[in-house]
Image (cartoon, grey):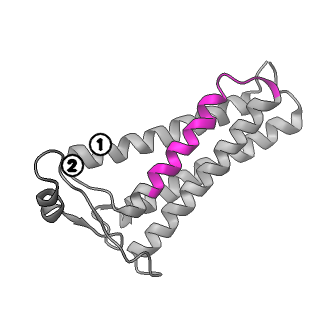
Amino acid sequence: MLSPNLAIARAIALLVPASLLAGAYVSQYGFGLYPCEMCWWQRYAHFAVLVPALLAFVARGELRLWLVRLAGVLLLIAAMLGGYHAGVEYGWWEGITTCATTAAAGGDPLEAILNAPIVRCDTAPWDLFGISLAGWNFLISGAAALAVLILSAQSGRKGVLGS
């Protein structure tokens, strides 16, 4: 039998990064908020979380527990990337110096690159209550990572891993 704490941790590890990625793509394709290079780093981290989170649904026993814990650690890394990016946006520290461009598909590649919008990493294109998307990623991913790690630790202590 699967521990209730591990079941909750496993669900959080899957649903939070999937929801944040969905929100990022809706923001990009629905509202024209194109990602900068550091936004892409955060997306890559969330995709990395999804791998062990999905595998935890088919794994059994001790392996399932460790996959959930790995997802929690990767979620914490995603949160740290969001926190770093938010700090750059708020001017707390200097970030990378390059900017990402988003080239349009099709047509002349050189023209697409030259006419592509420049997306700066040090400017928040949108915020809610003064918190940028990177800041929200930090808060949500950080809280989810802590929940996953605490719940999986409680599950491991009880020794009820199930098959």
Q: Is residue 58 left or right of residue 101?
A: right
Q: Is residue 79 left or right of residue 148?
A: left
Q: Residues within 10 Å of mark 1 (few under 14, many from 20)?
A: few
Residue at the image point whose x is 14% and y is 65% from the top: 114
Q: Residues within 10 Å of mark 2 (few under 14, many from 20)?
A: few
Q: Earlier in the sequence, mark 2 or mark 1?
A: 1
Q: Is residue 114 left or right of residue 58?
A: left
The residue where tag 2 is placed is 31
| Quadrant where the image shows the C terminus | top right
Given residues 133 and 117, the one toward you in this image is 117
Secondary structure beneath dot 1 equals helix
Magenta span contains residue 57: yes
Q: Which residues are magenta?
A: 41-61
Q: Is residue 78 above or below residue 94?
A: above
The residue where tag 1 is placed is 26
* Cα separation between marks 2 and 1: 7 Å
Q: Is residue 148 above or below residue 36?
A: above
Magenta span contains residue 80: no
Amino acid carrying label 1: it is Val
Secondary structure beneath dot 2 equals helix
Dots 2, 1 in contact, CB < 8 A: yes
